[in-house]
Image (cartoon, rainbow, N blue to C red):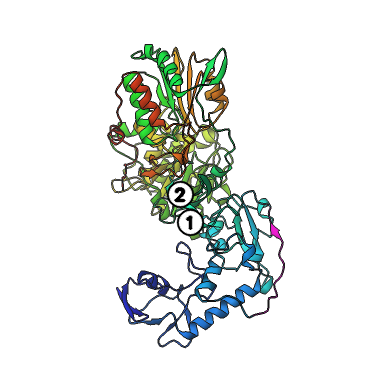
Amino acid sequence: MISLTIDGKTIEVTPGTTILRAAEMAGIHIPTLCDHDELTPYGGCRLCIVEIQGFRIPVTSCTMPVSQGMVVQTNTANLRASREQILSLLFSERNHFCPFCQLTGGDCELQNAALNEGMTHWPMFTSWNTFSVDTSHPFFVLDNNRCILCRRCVRACGELVGNFTLGVAERGIHSMLVADSDQPLGESSCISCGNCVQVCPTGALIDRQSAYRGLEKDLEITPSICIGCSVGCGVKLFTRDNQLVRIEGDWNAPVNCGILCKTGRFKPLEESRDRLTTPMLRLDGELQPTSWDEALWAIVDHLRPLIGRKEDGVAALASTRLPVESLTLFKSLFADRFQSSMVTSVEEGRPTGLLAAMATELRQPFEGRLDSLHTADCVVAIGVNLVEGHEVAGFFVKRAIPRGLKLVVIDPQPNDLDPLAAYTIKAVRGSDVDILLALQAAVVDEDLAKASPPAFDAEKILASLPGKTGLQVRTIREVARLLGTARQPVILFGKGITARSDNETLRMLIKLARLIGALDEDHSGLISVKGEANSLAAAQLGLDQPFQLNGNKAVFVALGDDYPSQRLIERLEKAPFLVVQASYASPLTEIANVVLPVEMWAEQDGHYLNLDGRLQLAHHALRAPSGAWAHRTIFTALADRLSLSISSNWKEELYKRVPSVAINEN
């Protein structure tokens, strides 16, 4: 530990800590604008300058590491004068007339910094340029007139997301934030994640949805979990008058450490579907509003005769966006009490069914955690496009490439990560098994195996490779050398592997992972991205079988706020009696016999099991419309009317099946 004194207060910190962070630990405030906890120190704004005993001039505390016996002053008269001059320069360089900015009143860090220094005006002449405002982006606006050139957004785009869209063009007073080679934001390589907007300290980047809808002090803030996919990012939901104003990443969240993609940040704010608030019952061929009591008794009358009829009773499907608590009651009601043989999820186990079967066979978890991506030096992405889905996991990969990570993409189709890959393997569709076997053979033949190699003829396998896959042996050998020499290889895979009808490809993947040291007794660098938010939980509950209507006399769909696929709608058109429990109107509710309105994602509490087994609690931030019920309330009400007892012990149910990745409740 290193001992130093800041403003007369002696503290101890670890080596490498900056003066700014040491002061924060001691509860001493040092003003700053360009600094951010999640970004590399930059020292651009100069506002955090401090005086150090023995130093001739003040230094930036955000970049200066502590040293033994250092004596620091943070608030001398000279420092205050310097900060006032720095702030005066910033205000005079650009149009910072605060009354005309939406961030006025406490959200603007520039304004707050000035007020904290006691400034009510600045003495310098204003001579700013007039920059055009870029409104081309669908989600946010860029106004260089408000920019202080702190480069937080530039660093966030590169360091946190790995996209490197933003930069600074020109020099001096003409300096301005640009996208790519000065393209309009809406036409640039921007991926709309909005992390630049969240880190901007002024009104230079403003998101369209929340603009002028209230300052942070006027909003309610609810920590929760994004359920846009199975990554399970931590979010903060900002609400006012029971309306969702904006969504930000939670910097303290263990999964995403604050970063979000557009699916988590902006897409939920664009909801335009018609909300269901009244139960509907089909009478004389038309859906008509009815009371909850009538709707529930109509369901009970149709379903009661089907209790105990496994093959021709009631089939049930649930969205994997539902909390574990709701999925457990759903499973208990239809699988345990109705004893139906067709109780599954709307995903039908495509992202998880083979994984669950493999975990059962191995009798232990075999997958690793997303954390391994932070230290990986080589990543193989097979059967997955991390730009089309599970994008935050893709950010972890993309941002590590400039630091030396080597990426291998195995995908017969064009993949958005192809331009960043060290190797792209484009083979004949359906030849994944041959590719994985050839990689094993090449690793063994190159004498790079880190585990006992399987018994096979490596030369024969490699010789047959071109005819089976269309690939050259040279390419496979080069990739094998990369994998075999990697210190911490990770294999990421998705539905391209898990949606198969058998486990042969997954077995080959596991064998390759063991051979290159990505899977051993101590750790696993084998990660599947699953599907929607609670895909893994649904698999643990056994809700992962393919759906078949067969001769079932009724179908119950707990859709929630999910989108029904066209494939599902077509298969349910022939259902004799269809109940749909949904938040929004859709083609599926249009063909239902009974429609039950339910809460949507921001109106419900419950647990979610993310793709690497982390059990997290989502909190409601909004109140559901008076006519919409909670999923749990509906399942319990049906069970009561049917005189059935259903289990709510969701945690016990989660552990009845061996998970593909160990469940972590911390």
Which residue is pictured at 28% across the width and 46% down the height?
521
Q: Amino acid at mark 1?
A: Ala
Q: What separation in Å lies between label 2 and label 1 (alpha carbons)?
A: 10 Å
Q: Quadrant of residue 298?
A: top left
Camera-nearest residue between 488 and 657: 657
**Range drawn in magenta:** 124-135
> In this orientation, does residue 346 appear?
no
Q: Is residue 75 above or below residue 181?
A: below
How far across and how far down the image is residue 445, in percent? Answer: 41, 45
- Secondary structure beneath dot 1 equals helix
Q: Residues within 10 Å of mark 1 (few under 14, many from 20)?
A: many
The main secondary structure of the magenta stretch is loop
Camera-nearest residue between 255 and 642: 642
Tell me the residue that label 2 is attached to. 379
Camera-nearest residue between 347 and 386: 347
Q: Quadrant of residue 530?
A: top left
How far across and how far down the image is residue 71, in percent? Answer: 37, 83
Which residue is pictured at 35% across the width and 27% down the height?
636
N-term mark: 2 or 1: 2
* Disc number for residue 400: 1
| Horizontal arrangement in the rendering, residue 207 relative to residue 341 (left or right) | right
| Horizontal arrangement in the rendering, residue 314 relative to residue 280 (left or right) | left
How far across and how far down the image is residue 271, in percent? Answer: 57, 39
Give the position of the N terminus as an image quadrant.
Answer: bottom left
Do labels 2 and 1 touch, CB within 8 Å?
yes
Q: Residues within 10 Å of mark 2 (few under 14, many from 20)?
A: many
Camera-nearest residue between 58 and 462: 58
Q: Is residue 531 above or below residue 485?
A: above
Q: Is residue 388 magenta?
A: no
Q: Amino acid at mark 2?
A: Val
